[in-house]
Image: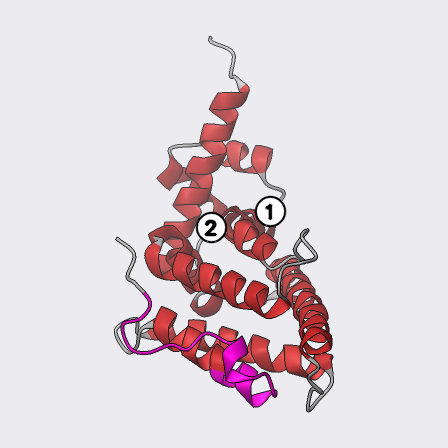
Amino acid sequence: MARRTKGDALATRHKLLDAAEHLFQAQGVSRTSLQDIARRAGATRGAVYWHFKDKADLFNAMMQRVSLPMEESFLDPEDTNVNALDHIRQATHKALKQIVTDAQTRRVFEVATQKVEYIQELQAVRLRHLAVRNGFLKHIERSMDAAASHSGVQLPATASMVAQGLHALIDGLIQNWLLDPDAFDLLEIGQCAINVYLCGLGFASSQVISVTPGSIPESP
């Protein structure tokens, strides 16, 4: 019998994650068993436990596979000369574009927002969700403080409150678009809404990108 290589193990891991994505989307997380996932992936239940501790661990790995690059784009820029407002806008646009143009990302976010229940066996999923959200809020809070200081703007609320508002705006846009992708253009409306929000905080219109219908090119 041929010995399994690291490449074989990685391929099996990806097959399991692929299977989980599709099954979670089709029938929900709580109604999908690890045996279901193994069967769809053409693997054994033992293979599932070789790669993942439990269903929550598998779910978090599925999320991280597509969301980690998005999360990293919101990290504080290494170049301290980068305008904080530009960084927020660019990172947000990149995240929204990935959701709109990449079917896998869209599928995983649909699972995360519509197909998961935070029941006891999935408490680790809830904890990861909270950790990612809290990390995002801290990065936005620092960016808002830096942008206000650089632009000489007195924020109408604390940077923490402003960050909470921006998070709610972005999160709400994504969740509503996933419910009905034909209802509005997530990229165009998203950028417009963020600009309106920033202007409402006191940043001059010249410091934000003016968006008009059709000004954001569609991705091929």
Asked if residue 198 can be seen in this view, the reply is yes
Residue occupying the point 56% across, 84% down: 204
Mark 1 crowd level (few <14, some 14–19, many ≥20, 10 Å Cα) = some
Q: Position of residue 217 (x, y in %)?
A: 30, 63
Q: Position of residue 133 (x, y in %)?
A: 63, 67
Q: Look at the numbered disc 1 and give the secondary structure of its residue.
A: loop
Q: Look at the numbered disc 2 and give the secondary structure of its residue.
A: loop
81 or 179: nearer the eye?
Answer: 81
The residue beneath circle 2 is 33
Q: Position of residue 55 (x, y in %)?
A: 56, 50
> Tag on residue 162?
none
94 or 56: nearer the eye?
Answer: 94
Give the mark toward the camera: 1 or 2: 1
- Indicate left or right for 69 with 127 as reference: left
- Residue 203 lies in the magenta stretch: yes
Mark 2 crowd level (few <14, some 14–19, many ≥20, 10 Å Cα) = some
Query: Compared to 104, does 133 lie above or below?
Result: below
Residue occupying the point 71% across, 71% down: 146
The residue beneath circle 1 is 54
- Indicate left or right for 170 with 136 as reference: left
Amino acid type, label 1:
Asp
Q: Which residues are magenta?
A: 196-216
Q: Quadrant of residue 166?
A: bottom right
Asked if residue 28 can be seen in this view, the reply is no
Query: Compared to 162, does 135 lie above or below?
Result: above
The residues bearing labels 1 and 2 have C-alpha atoms spaced at a distance of 10 Å
Magenta span: helix, strand or loop, mainly?
loop
Amino acid type, label 2:
Ser
